[in-house]
Image: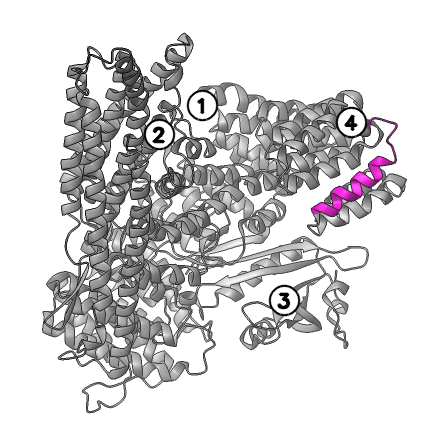
Amino acid sequence: MLRHILVTSNMAARGHVQDPNDRRLRPIYDYLDNGNNKMAIQQADKLLKKHKDLHCAKADPSRQVLKAIGLQRTGKQDEAFSLAQEVATLEPTDDNSLQALTILYREMHRPELVTKLYEAAVKKVPLSEEYHSHLFMAYARVGEYKKMQQAGMALYKTVPKNPYYFWSVMSLVMQAISAQDEKLAQTMFLPLAERMVEKMVKEEKIEAEAEVQLYFMILERLGKYVEALDMVRGPLGEKLTSELQSRENKCMMMYQRLQLWPECNALSYKLLLKNPDEWQFYLSYFDSLFHLMDKSWSPPNEEEHCVEGPVHTTVAEAVKFVVDRMEEEDKKDSRPLRGPYMACLELIHRLRQRGCPDEEELGDPLELMLQFFGKFGDKPCCITDLKIYLHLLPPEQHTQFENRLGELVPLGEVGEDGFGFPGDTKALQRHLCVCQLSRVLGLQHTLDTEGKLCLITELKAHYHYGLQFGKSCLKTELQFSDTYCLMVAHVYIDLWTETGDENMLWQCLGVLEEGLSYSPSNAQFKLLLLLLFCRLGAFQPVVDLYSSLDAKHVQHDTIGYLLTRYAGSLGQFAAASQSYNFSLRFFHSNQKDTSEYIIQAYKYGAFEKIPEFIAFRTRLNQSLHFAQVRTERMLLDLYTEADITSSLEESVKAMGLCPEEDDIPWDNMRDNRDLTVLFSWDPKDRELTEEHRRLSLEEESVWLKVRSLTLRLLASLALLGHAPSKRNSDKTNENGVSAKSSTLQTLLSQLDLTLQTAAQITEKQTQYPFLGPPSSRLASALSSGSCHCQASALQLSLTLQELETTGLDDSSELQTQICNSFKSLIVQLQELLSRCKGDVLEMKDSRLMTQPSLLETLVFFVETVCVVLWVASYSASVLRPLKSSLQKKKKKKTKDSSTAMPVVLSGFQEWTGSLQGIVTQALDHVKGQEASLTALKLAALTLGVGHAQTQEECGFTRAAMDKVQTSYLGSLQELGDLLRKRADSLKSLKF
Amino acid sequence: MTTLRAFTFNFDICYNNYGIPFYLQYLAHWPEYFIVAEAPGGELMGYIMGKAEGSVAREEWHGHVTALSVAPEFRRLGLAAKLMEMLEEISERKGGFFVDLFVRVSNQVAVNMYKQLGYSVYRTVIEYYSASNGEPDEDAYDMRKALSRDTERKSIIPIPHPVRPEDIE
């Protein structure tokens, strides 16, 4: 790849001339391309040695850079950088060095250095088209729009080619788009861009379609819709040919902006006659029609209504138009289009909204929907289509509708189980559509428990029967009857949430596992299983499910939340770390990718794509989930490693954490989560609402704030511990320390405020739809008491810092205060631990019961222990020197033994003892849970009693139970391991 | 019924198989060849993505279908045919001689669909698809349909011998 880039651009630059240097560079390129970096370095060294007499960089700069690339790739960043800078300071102008340095800087994530490189090259070779254009692209990579504008013009002056001129114009548009001040965009950047284009228009120099597109973009952004419309309709518009219907679409857009309803209506009508399936034009047709009616518009003359042709201004005309379209479809021999029939329902919906009585002329919605079902009921999309218009049916018609639909489904004779089955996949699809509609109408929800259980039996029978149609399906294909299985699961979930009967949940897991065994690619099965396991607190099975979903790129942002919400909170630290990495890798690579393609878009004149690419990148950078994984990843690393493998301070430094810095875009946070990724056929009143989305984002943001403040506070604490010993020797250092403690103080009060907001939010006790967003950890964090305990621990570090300055004499009040804090922390921890007590999994009367919340609380306990122990370790670092100076004093006045041990020292000793005690208690609890989990013999459970589960189904249910049991054990083991390591670190605190 | 529109780069691409750079590359170069279909409820029904390439002098300038995808619940509605028709129309306007595409030899459903739309097998490309998920390498059909500029339909006269991927343009 590397050589490909270099060679092609060299060839372009110099044509066929063979540079002897190139030939000798080839082996180094080969090694680099094959990932053999060590050999590349050796080869470069070998060749460089031949020029021993000269300064390496001067003699052979490009080889030097290639060596640097090798070094960079073997992890020797510093060496690579200084080697590269040696060459860079020479301001090279040979292609090999420039290109190789460009690649190196890109790999070092230092694109700004490329601009410096070409700025120098352009100065030395001012007539080089190639270097000018590289400079432009280098600016593009870092988003320096103003410099791009100038570089574009410089390029155009060197080589007067149109694209260069328009690069410059586009860079002005980008300045407008990125301007914080909209006024500046509207009064300066865009008008200037407009004038630049106008100049070319006047001189008749416009050549390409891209240039016209850009002109349109500018006029549109300036709100000059009339001018834009004239332009599109005029001779320049003739260049708009690549995109289909490009001129029509642009005209339509301008008609709407200008509220030119006659033109809008006439154009929609024309386009619909041509293609009666284009949904967007039905919408603009109806919109414009009603606007015209509201204005009592009438055509200025009989012959021509407007430039676009005849205009419809009455309901009668619209009704006739729609009815005609349906009749056209009815007449056709080929497969009918759905558009006209949907348009009919849409028109009824709009007439009803306006209280207009004419809807009857179109027919009864119930009959129309039955007709639609008759035509399209065997298509899987029938449900998505009809769902939109179900509100046209009054509730009292719902059952009738369901029955009438049923009559249109050809089923075989009723067997001994009381059910008739479809004879082919088309009939199956129809039957399935009726089941889905019945659920959407809420008819399944109103059934009582017995009714729901019967429904489950029926759906299961259909599911199993339908499997025969998919016997020849490939592994990658879905079974025709999969949706039945998913619906069974949904009814089980209804029963579980209504009755609290956990058996329903276990059976639900069983049926989904069974479904997955027949249809291993069904993403909906996996998603629902994943959600259920998470709710059960069993994270282990989730890892495999998620990886088999084969989530790609953007999905790491849109559905990654399903994973990352639960990973850490269930104590599966290794899996959590892995899942954060999945997401982070995506976010980081996205950064690089987009800038490359922004540059491509300039090259090919796809100007309208540039703002889209940038908006996309921004949306990812401001992603809530991105900020969450960033924060959680660092917290997790601290919890699992700091003061175990390396000190807290070292860990914080390795992460580059700075307590003063907040890199989360609080005011522009984007919620990119796909909260409807799980199929749902719930009726409207149970669906996810905008309010749910808002509340969920609010809750997640506040939780993120708590976490990010905790992280910054920990960084702050780590840096506090850095300074003490030189306290007296260095005045500036003391200032440094107080600056640090004031950061700590500020962050603590922010945390305090955030926790108050958090309390208000959790008071609302928002319940989301089951298949909607999971609740954040906020509520359980608050109710467990862990947030407050952590906050008081961190607060204590401030007091200790004060003691450090005051010293042991004259600080009895402070010391008492500290001792009280020690005691209070013990009480808080003890309470937190008591909330963890209980059995996560137990068997009662042959039923399996779970209490996953205990696991989550236990995780909070462990996290809190970590924080408290870091504070304890800081306390020790403060008290140790105080104690030793006291001992020195004591030695001096040996006779005077009356000086008692200061309370803070004895208090600390007592404190570490109590901490040790609590950690031991916790470990005992974990051990106890592990033992009782291991002792639990699930095989002893009798399944299937009363609920007619087959032997096979029981097997799947049992397998799901095993997974949960194993997962709990895994969580407990990881938590236990961490606690043990923390207990060890406690020992070193004694003195 | 469908809303067909130019693809605006956004989160729509969630549920497809290629990496983001792949889409960006096509959008930056051939934005007009990227069309999506949307259902009235806003669901993404499917999309087509392609490009124009080849030498005009050698009469090899043509439209190429890079990806055509229709969501399972929107299949058997004629959407793929509609999207193909649009891509052909764009290629006509660009003065292409033909439209071509590659399809797995085993994907009989797709091969038949393309035949119905007027495409014929021009040649077989050996092991065009690399092995994945435990499946071995697989051959591709290079299928073509002549456009109006190729009046004698020279571009679609089949090549009898299979070729290797490195031998195709």
* Pointer 3 residue: B130
**Is label 2 in a helix, a strand or a loop?**
helix
| Mark 2 crowd level (few <14, some 14–19, many ≥20, 10 Å Cα) | many
Parent chain of label 4: A
Label 1 to label 4: alpha-carbon separation? 37 Å
In the image, the segment drawn in magenta is A37-55
- Residue of label 1: A180
Q: Are marks 4 and 3 in contact (CB under 8 Å)?
A: no
Real-space CA distance between mark 2 and mark 1, rounded to the nearest whole angstrom: 29 Å
Secondary structure beneath disc 3?
loop
Q: Quadrant for residue A536, please give it.
A: bottom left
Give x and y (percent) for residue A161: 74, 32
The reply to whether the C-beta atoms of the residues labelled 3 and 2 are less than 8 Å apart is: no
For residue A92, the mark is: 4
- Whole-angstrom CA distance, mark 4 to mark 3, is 42 Å
Which one is closest to the eye, mark 3 or mark 1? 3
Which of the two discs, 2 and 1, labels the residue nearer the N terminus?
Answer: 1
Q: Chain of mark 3?
A: B
Which chain is home to disc 1?
A: A
